[in-house]
Image: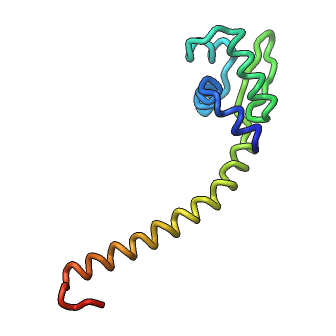
Amino acid sequence: MNSTFSALAEPNRFNIVELLRDGPLSVGDVAVQLGLNQPQTSKHLRVLCDAGLVEVHAVANRRIYKLRAAPFQELDAWMESYRRIWEERFDRLDDYLQELQRKEANPDNKQ
């Protein structure tokens, strides 16, 4: 998962992943949409391929890139543990705020 975070930490690569969410694209299409030159785009796509985030298919003389689901599913599973932690904390905060509201509504009845 470190390679996933490392690859996505670079803004251009993150933007490429965002573009590929909508479907496969060629190097040229990615370059045009992000305003990058083609060699720079190819280097970023190579890093994403090496990290396992995208895969490439040759169609005639073009290379078409698309996202791979597995690394994002792993990332989602890892993040799930943190979601549970935050949900528990928000639940406790909600309980505390409700208790404060009850006390505020009934200042003579301190429970």
On screen, residue 2 versus residue 32, left or right, reads right
Which quadrant of the structure image shows residue 13?
top right
On screen, residue 48 versus residue 107, left or right, reads right
The residue nearer to you, when weighing 99 against 12, is 99
Residue in view at x 53 percent, y 62 percent:
86
Q: Position of residue 24 (x, y in %)?
A: 67, 26
Q: Position of residue 17 (x, y in %)?
A: 63, 30
The residue nearer to you, when weighing 53 against 55, is 53
State whether residue 67 is above or below residue 31: below
Quarter of the rendering occupied by the N terminus? top right
Residue in view at x 58 percent, y 31 percent:
18
Colour scheme in use: rainbow
Residue in view at x 41 percent, y 70 percent:
93
The residue nearer to you, when weighing 26 against 45, is 45
Q: Position of residue 7 (x, y in %)?
A: 71, 32
Residue in view at x 76 percent, y 25 percent:
47
State whether residue 86 is above or below residue 100: above
State whether residue 106 is above or below residue 27: below
Which quadrant of the structure image shows residue 63?
top right
On screen, residue 102 versus residue 27, left or right, reads left
Quarter of the rendering occupied by the C terminus? bottom left
How many marks are shown on the rendered structure? 0
The residue nearer to you, when weighing 32 against 5, is 5
